[in-house]
Amino acid sequence: MQELPIAPGSIVVVRDEEWLVTQLEPASDGTFVHVQGLTELVRDTEAIFSTALDTIEPLDPAKAEVVGDDSPAYRRSRLWLESTMRKTSVPLADTALTVATRGLADTLDYQLSAVRQALDPDKLRPRILLADAVGLGKTLEIGMILSELVRRGRGERILVVTPKHVLEQMQFELWTRFALPFVRLDSTGIQRIRQKLPANRNPFAFYKRIIVSIDTLKSDRYLAHLEKQHWDAVVIDESHNVTNSSAQNNRLARLLATRSDALILASATPHNGKAESFAELIRMLEPSAVTPDGELVEDLVRGLVIRRHRHSPEVSSVVGADWAERLEPENVLVPASAIENEIADELDTVWLYPETGTAPYSGANAKLFPWTLAKAFLSSPAALAETVKNRVRTVGASTTTTRRELDALARLGEMASRAVDGESAKYDALVKHLRDIGVGRKSTMRAVVFAERVPTLHWLRKRLATDLKMSEEQIVVLHGQLSDEKQQAVVESFKQESSPIRVLVTGDVASEGVNLHLQCHHLIHFDIPWSLIRIEQRNGRIDRYGQKHRPRITTLLLNPTSDNFAGDIRVLKKLMEKEHEAHRALGDAASLMGKYDVDAEERAIIRVLAEKRDLDAEIRDVEQVAEGDDVAALLARLMAGAAPSTPAVVNDRTGVYATDLEFLRDALDEVFITPSQPAPNGVAWKEHGGALAELTPSVDLAARLSVLPQSYLSERRVNEKLMLATSTIRGNERLLEARSDDSSSLWPDAHYLSPLHPVLDWASDRALASLARNQIFAVRSDREDAAVLIHGSLTNKRGQVVASSFLVVSFPDADNPAFNLPTPHASVASAMEDLQVRATNTGAVASPKQYEKLVSAAVAAARNPMADLERSAGQEVVRRVQQWQHRAQRWEHDAEALVQHAALRSRRSAIAKEQELAAEMLPAQLLVRPLLVTVGGNA
């Protein structure tokens, strides 16, 4: 087995070609070395070599050949050095943020604190549950964390799992704001990839970064493929959907947790109220954070979960005008019309509180179905008519047993049919409200109207189109029976200012994870979900970060004259009030009832109504939640005990160029004869005023861009012309303009040139090819003496960079290399300032080979001081690993005393694997490599 002194960023020779090492992966018989080709034959080729099968030759840094640089302003040297640094991972334990603050996202302290917590070096792996309340920007936090993981060499292969209706939204945010492209495998994407692959090929090995819906991925057909894959990072959005230990979603999540290094779970409602379910979620993040007998270790959980809400001090103090405060909700009691009162009386006396003592229902669930009818009626006459029709179809032919029910259903159905086309007081109130807030055929005002039942949605659309004199394009229906592509198209259209949609009539498919706030701040509940969870989710669609107008939430409550129904309406009105109270104090309405399940909450509300119970007996006060001993109380304590956000440490100069544009500009000048000309001599590069630039992708660049979102590629015709915004101000402007009346696409016409942009990665690879095997440049300096810039990196057994340092080794007498003076530097930028490279190049350094003896001396001289510099960092890593190992050993000791049932054996196996991982995190070797030679005087 070949032991290699290499790390990500090293150059190796395999099969007589040069390769850049991008990742090392331990294997049972050696190491898998992930590389990218540098020499002409293999350029842009990615490969994986095994030390057990291939001879991998690391270049001896002490034998580096020194060559002169005759390029203008030493452009070639600076490009090579910058590209080398871009390909060199930021150390795992570096707490400074390097790229998270440089995307198109507001760098709010509370969001950056989530990034820092996820990357906390005290963790064995980057794992976190983002449990912020609805609207705080969990997607942005995910993007920031993933960006930092990529820069640290821990984000090469990423899988993002979301509900299907937010696939495109998540893909859009990650690409437009952070330049992280993900291939979307919705139903169309799966079909496309199957056409490219043989039947036996693993679809998840084809692309490096994938976004897929949990509904697709949980299928048995993909299980075998997933078991063979390992990801650097996995994101599971809306992770409350994976807490049921008996469901496919949970099986999928548990599998992915074992097949990934980093794990990010995100949910505003991160548990179902059951301690064992929440413990299962925590185990996915950190097995030792739950004791062998199932108790949560609160101190460890605190480091794994981040939980804030709109009114948390660290949030409210910074969101300002970017999240306008919600207006007091309006709960409008609407006196019922004659036909609505007639239906209410029928439901009251025949079904809900029958005068005969028993309802006419002939099925097995006589207590539930009458409330199904009542709920349908409170949605709309159309929903009631549909419910009655379905029940009649289920009952079938009239018999002695069913005749009474069928007769009652016939009367109710006849009333509902009359009401569908007749007077509806609640509908009239909706029309009046829409007109009052300014919604109209020629107006730009928009509103979201929520209703539970699909028949209600279609009934509303049909009547509103007539009464508001609007076209089919202006009033659009969204519900779960639509295809995922259609759902995504409606949501994305509604975000654009140019969209014709003025009223979005939607079911609760839009209540979870969908952003509707960009062009809208009016939300109307046409019916009330009998669930605090659902109410909170609905309201969060427009009441979220980025909302510039105060959200106005209106609920229409039909108020029949029936005494019983009047009492029921008061209960439902109180539900709305309770949600608002929880919104301000907890950011989590689900904890009030403690059911953490929409259906369970609905059943509880039905019991309250049917048994005429006090709602307060079913719903806790905010104070009672915090004083409890359940998971909700734990999360309340985590919020209350959270330390105030501290300013993030930012290090956005990890290279030698001040801006990404300067680097790209120089790279194009170096690679192409005339960058401004079309291919083959250029890429039609053009810079416009106002921080805009454009180019026509070369063939090799176009191949790299093929993994970008397909709709972006086609709608913006990227392969013909790629527009770049080169400042955050212009990038944000183009993002906003894409939602304007003049835009035909939600994708910005100019994509922001952020640090991880594929164009910059392509430019880096091109620049690295400027030197032959094991060469470094020599340049002139304003210093009197000669010097060599050395980079040292400490890597663990997984090949990950644990610590990094730079050294300038000065030679007062170039003829006496043994006499030298090493000076440490924290960054390459600092080291370059010390080296004082001249701004003007008057010609290549004469006889550069004479300085090769300085390189070998500098490499030798650097080993001791760099070993000292890295030793303290290595000791800190050892301390952290040993601390985790001791915790795991205590867990294992406690587990031995328990009955060894199957679940416990599985958890012990997980702990054992974690211990193996911990051993691989220990420092393994120090690598020293020369980067640049500078010479003084007129050499």
Image (tube, helix red, strand yellow):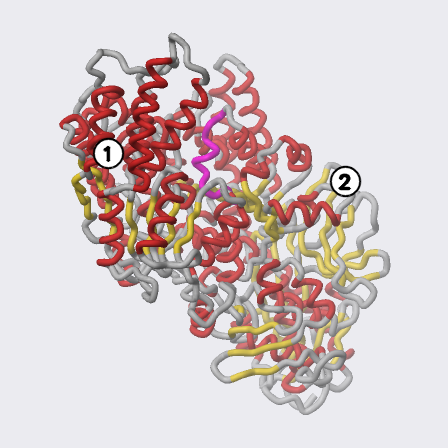
Please name the amino acid that badge 2 sits on. Ala
The residue identified by callout 1 is 626
Q: What residue is shown at x 28% (from left), y 28% (from top)?
A: 374
Q: Can you say whether 620 is above or below 110 in the image?
A: above
Q: Can you say whether 708 is above or below 831 in the image?
A: above
Q: Secondary structure at mark 1?
A: helix
Residue 887 is situated, as x and y percent measured from the top left of the image, at 47, 31
Q: What residue is shown at x 59% (from left), y 71% (from top)?
A: 808
Residue 831 falls left or right of residue 594:
right
Residue 169 is situated, as x and y percent measured from the top left of the image, at 48, 53
Q: What residue is shown at x 80% (from left), y 53% (from top)?
A: 56
The quadrant in which the C terminus is found is bottom right
Q: Nearer the viewer, mark 1 or mark 2?
A: 2
Q: Can you say whether 312 is above or below 660 in the image?
A: above
The quadrant in which the N terminus is found is top right
Question: Could you tell me how far apart the alpha carbons at marks 1 and 2 are, in whole angstroms?
Answer: 54 Å
How many residues crowd mark 2 within 10 Å: few (<14), some (14–19), many (20+)? few
How many residues crowd mark 1 within 10 Å: few (<14), some (14–19), many (20+)? some
Residue 277 is situated, as x and y percent measured from the top left of the image, at 43, 27
Q: Nearer the viewer, residue 808 or 822?
A: 808
The numbered disc on residue 199 is 2
Q: What residue is shown at x 59% (from left), y 77% (from top)?
A: 694
Q: Nearer the viewer, residue 409 or 67?
A: 409
Residue 217's image quarter? Answer: top right
Residue 20 is situated, as x and y percent measured from the top left of the image, at 72, 60
Please name the amino acid that badge 1 sits on. Ala
The numbered disc on residue 923 is none
Q: Secondary structure at mark 2?
A: loop
- First to last magenta residue range: 235-245
Q: Nearer the viewer, residue 496 or 886?
A: 496
